[in-house]
Image (spheres, grey):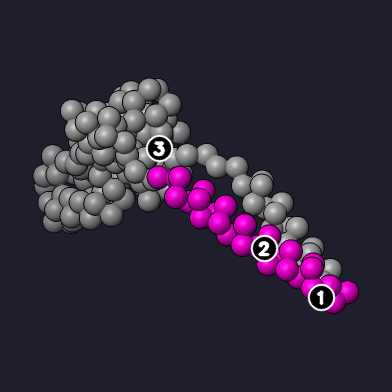
């Protein structure tokens, strides 16, 4: 659970909500050293700031520990929810739901991928293996030849499948992304 006053903790440290764990840690250590009561014995404001920064740091460290340190925590640019953030192609930070196009907007650079069924080549390869073993056990030249032909057909079939698949963004998709 991300705390409700999440933004206030980042404000106490003077950081944006997209800041990562190491940035939060470095800023908190610097501010804690700056406002430490041993350095500012008679300053009530420094004592208040020290307590505020310590509380913000503790809360944010707990949130990072629960949600992982590999992604920043903060408010999603798409929906405004507090969650782990992922950088989109437009440079903004999105939660996983918004980044994965669950709400109709594409935020991550995920090119379209064609779905391919490889049942045919797999069955043909199985036939080639069976013919190979049959030919080796019985000494049948026809079975060995059938195995070689079957394996060649499988390789040709897989080559044609690979040539059909394109992992590129279409021209329409590129123009739509450029307009953002």
Q: Which residue is mark 3?
A: 112
Q: Residue furthest right?
A: 138
Looking at the rendered image, the disc whose residue lies closer to the viewer, 3 or 1, is 1
**Label 3: how many residues lie within 10 Å, few (<14), some (14-19) or many (20+)?**
few
Q: Is residue 168 left or right of residue 38?
A: right
Quick one: 42 or 54, which is closer to the camera?
54
Region in magenta: 138-166
Q: How far is mark 3 from mark 1, CA to CA?
A: 44 Å
Q: Which residue is mark 1?
A: 136
Q: Residue at x 34, y 30 (%)?
A: 106
How many numbered circles does the render carry?
3
Looking at the rendered image, the disc whose residue lies closer to the viewer, 2 or 1, is 2
Disc 2 and disc 3 in contact, CB within 8 angstroms: no
Is 153 inside the magenta-drawn segment? yes
Q: Vertically, is 154 above or below 50?
A: below
Disc 3 and disc 1 in contact, CB within 8 angstroms: no
Q: Earlier in the sequence, mark 2 or mark 3?
A: 3
Mark number displayed over residue 149? 2
In the rendered image, which quarter is residue 97 located in? top left
Quadrant placement of the C terminus: top left
Q: How far is mark 2 from mark 1, CA to CA?
A: 15 Å
Mark 2, secondary structure of its residue: helix
Q: Earlier in the sequence, mark 2 or mark 1?
A: 1
**Dominant SS in magenta:** helix
- Residue 26 percent coordinates (x, y): 23, 55
């Amino acid at each position: 659970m991300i705390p409700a006053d999440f933004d206030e903790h980042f404000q106490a440290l003077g950081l944006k909500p997209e800041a990562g764990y190491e940035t939060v840690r470095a800023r908190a250590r610097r501010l804690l050293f700056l406002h430490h009561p041993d350095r500012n014995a008679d300053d009530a404001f420094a004592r208040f700031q020290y307590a505020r920064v310590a509380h913000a740091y503790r809360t944010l460290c707990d949130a990072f520990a629960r949600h992982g340190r590999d992604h920043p925590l903060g408010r999603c640019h798409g929906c405004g929810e507090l969650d782990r953030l992922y950088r989109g192609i437009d440079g903004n930070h999105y939660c996983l739901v918004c980044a994965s196009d669950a709400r109709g907007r594409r935020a991550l650079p995920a090119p379209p991928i064609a779905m391919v069924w490889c049942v045919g080549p797999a069955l043909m390869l199985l036939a080639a293996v069976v013919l190979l073993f049959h030919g080796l056990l019985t000494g049948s030249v026809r079975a060995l030849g059938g195995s070689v032909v079957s394996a060649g057909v499988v390789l040709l079939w897989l080559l044609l499948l690979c040539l059909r698949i394109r992992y590129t963004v279409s021209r329409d998709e590129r123009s739509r992304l450029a307009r953002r």
